[in-house]
Amino acid sequence: MQRFGKKNAEAQRVDGDRPKMETTQRERMMALAVITAALVIVAGLTLVATSGGTPLSRCNGILISQQKAECLLALANSTKNASVCSYLTSSLAGRCITNIALLSGNASICDGIPSNSQTYAGCLTGIGTAKHNVSYCGGLGEPYLSTCAYSVASGENFSSILTCSMIGNASLSADCSAKSHYNDAVLLRNATYCSYLPTAYNYSLVSYISQSSARIFGLTNVTSTLAYLNTSPSSYCYYNLARLDYNRSLCGLVTGQLGTLCGYQLSTSASYNISAVNSITLQNVTALCSQAPQVAQAVCSYALYIYIAAAQRNASVCGMIRVAQYQNACYAGIANKYQNSSYCSYIQNSTERIACSVGVPTNST
């Protein structure tokens, strides 16, 4: 009897445990059901937010912040509605407002950006440059006023000395004024303006005049590479005017070997014309330059080496030039043509290396 009672008691204990196991299982099932329901609700809300309502509400309903920002930026641009920008973070809001101001051509939209910020200055600079109107820069303080006015001047291709006069930064003002004087010299065929340009080598100005030469005389004109042969902006200005007007007397104002070449090019007996050569290679440099007078043969060779190095994007060709100033000019020529300052690193002279790098992007492709 006792054994029977013991078994009965064990059976009752086991039976008593079963309800607890069933309860635990039921709780798990209920928890799973709650989670599933929550996910369904979240998914449903997301679907509703992104598939219905206004475009703004659909953008704001996106849960992933990056996608939400992209949606709001696209909406603001497409509608040109600056109020949409207020839903973006402060760093993106300024960019958003600037885009709309530029798209609309409306400077008052820039007022939505804090006035003491670089973003605000960039907004007005963009408007002023697009409209070729330096007055939009007037309310800015330095250094923003100078960079804004210089940007407007650049957008006008430095056609107005008045725009340059608004630049407070001395370096930018001098650069702007010199480029403006060069344009006046070419436009008015007036050599007096050349005298306003620096008589010392200036990489930025020489590069600008070189680009102008390519437009005036044609992209295939090899003599434009002479810009990098350590000539001054003033001399190069006289040289170009001499060629434009076929005025040999101006060659007397061109210093160095460029002046010698100028006189020879414009002489009545000249038959040497590098720009007419269609095929220039390392193998025929000597033959081509042998046509030039003795005094011009060296500078001719340097010019052709620079031309080949730039055309082939091959800095090793520059190493074939044994005269340091022309070798450095060769590296600077490649750097400027391809807008890649890494070529400037070949220049040993630190002053010329820095001058080469100014205004040229680093490691641009």
Image (cartoon, rainbow, N blue to C red):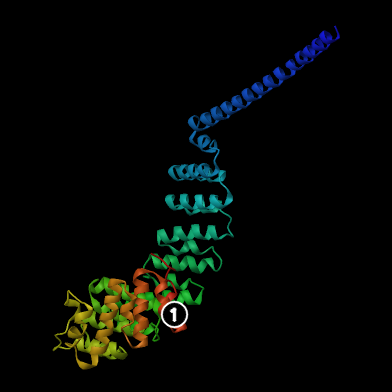
361 and 106: which one is in front? 361
State the residue at coordinates (19%, 81%).
284
Q: For mark 1, what is the residue?
A: 353
Residue type at numbered disc 1? Arg
Classify residue 62 as left or right of residue 190: right
Lateral position of residue 16 relative to residue 53, left or right: right
- The residue at the point 25 percent across, 73 percent down is 216
Residue 328 found in image quarter: bottom left
Q: Is residue 202 left or right of residue 275?
A: right
Residue 181 in view, yes or no: no
Residue lying at the far bottom in this picture: please name it: 294
Numbered label tally: 1
Q: Position of residue 89 (x, y in %)?
A: 58, 48
**Depth check, front residue: 117 or 227:** 227
| Residue 203 in sight here | yes
Residue 217 percent coordinates (x, y)? 23, 74
Furthest residue in direction top, as rendered: 1
Relative to 194, say whether 172 is above or below.
Answer: above
> Residue 358, image x and y in percent?
44, 74
Say left or right for 296 vs 199. left
At numbered mark 1, what does the secondary structure look like: helix, strand or loop? helix
From the image, which quarter does the C terminus lie in? bottom left
Give the residue at x 39% y 70%: 340
User: Horizontal and vertical percent for residue 255?
Assistant: 32, 90
Q: Quadrant of residue 24?
A: top right
Up/down of 339 relative to 7, above or below: below
Quadrant of the image for the N terminus?
top right
